[in-house]
Amino acid sequence: MRFNYQARTKRGETQTGVVEAGSREAAIETLQRHDLVVVYLEGLSEVPFYTRSLKIFQRVKAKEITIFYRQLAILFEASVSPLDSLRILAEQTKNPLFRDIIFEIENDVKGGENLSDAMAKHPKVFSAFYVNVVKAGEATGKLHDVLKYLADHAEQEYNLAFKVKGAFTYPIVILTLFLVVGAIVMIYVIPQLTAVIEESGQELPIATRILIIVSKFLKNWFWLLGLLIVGMVLGLIRFKKTEKGRRIFDIVKLKIPIFKSLFQKIYLARLAENLRTLVIGGIPILKALDISSIVIGNKIYEEIILKAKDQVRVGKTISSAFSDYPKQITSMFTQMVGVGEKTAELGTILEKVAYFYQQEVDRTVANMTQLIEPFMLLILGAGVAFLLSAVLMPIYNLASGM
């Protein structure tokens, strides 16, 4: 929140300005820390309507959360108090939504709440995973160490997601550009050539006839096609948010021939990293499995982890519970977890497993990128060849007949 203020300095001089804080009391305390005597303070509630409407599009990015944990860990290591750490981070955060959230957390902590409880009030920014790890750090008195684990974990998750998105960005951009350019050619260029070709009276090749039909359809009904595409995309997005839709999409991810291996490695890397962070953070293993199922990001793996948790509750080891699902969880993963359980070094072993699968994801992404490039060139070449043959063949026939 922002507040207009008028205050007096120690010398009796009047000073006015704007201060940002989570509440009115926090704003007063901030000004008092700067040796100012508050005379007048008013919240800035009236903002332009377009500014208010844009707030629905604001969100906190994963990179911002990653930086927040790393900086918070550094400040704690430097023996800066939690309140001062939160205030410093809020003041230097550029995202207004995230800044307000940090100010609110600071205000809650100032009111006597634990950091984990204050974070839990913002589940869209701080997931159950992060909240529970922080809570464990508070209970064991190792909050500083836990924050370092969380910072490492957040960086690993961000890097993993960044690499996967990067692998899909190139083909999507190239294919989108090709479709846009192709649509422009079909709507504006082909109709002009069609008039010339049809006036010749010659029998048109099948490729040319297909091109003319598609061109006429796009020219007359492109708006309808656009509405259909937008409707399908919005429908799929809405369907994906349902329980049934999410399950179907997650099953498809693990069935696509080219990508299923990549997704499996991503989920195994995420499972190992999540469990490792929770175990090192002092979370009981049943609670760790429960939290991991929530943040794994795939309904199928979520169900497997929850079933494994039920088996562990009645006395089975994690490795033996996971071994019941060889298609989703590899034997290498279960064997390494078994070694960690036998040697009481589960956290260390999971760290090595997470690193192994993260490296596997890197290699798979690199190989896919190398394979996708020639594949995309082949598709683009075929499309260009079809357009050229459909246009040039009747023109060549027309020139030959003259």
Image (cartoon, rainbow, N blue to C red):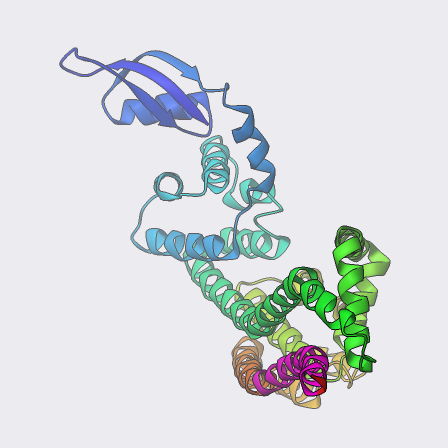
- Between 6 and 290, which is closer to the camera in this rendering? 6
Q: Which region is colored magenta? A: 373-400
Q: Report the residue that reaches farthest toward the front.
A: 402
As displayed, is residue 231 above or below residue 275?
Answer: above
390 part of magenta stretch: yes
In this rendering, does residue 308 appear at all? no
Relative image position of residue 165 (x, y in whole percent): 57, 69
User: To which quarter of the image does residue 300 belong?
Assistant: bottom right
Residue at position x 58%, y 51% from top? Answer: 131
Total number of numbered labels? 0
Relative image position of residue 231 (x, y in whole percent): 79, 52
Relative image position of residue 271 (x, y in whole percent): 64, 72
As displayed, is residue 303 above or below residue 32?
Answer: below
As displayed, is residue 393 above or below residue 55?
Answer: below
Q: Report the residue that reaches farthest toward the right.
A: 244
Q: Report the residue that reaches farthest toward the left.
A: 11
Residue at position x 51%, y 65% from top? Answer: 158
Q: Is residue 356 left or right of residue 393?
A: left
Residue at position x 54%, y 79% from top? Answer: 358
Magenta stretch: dominant secondary structure: helix
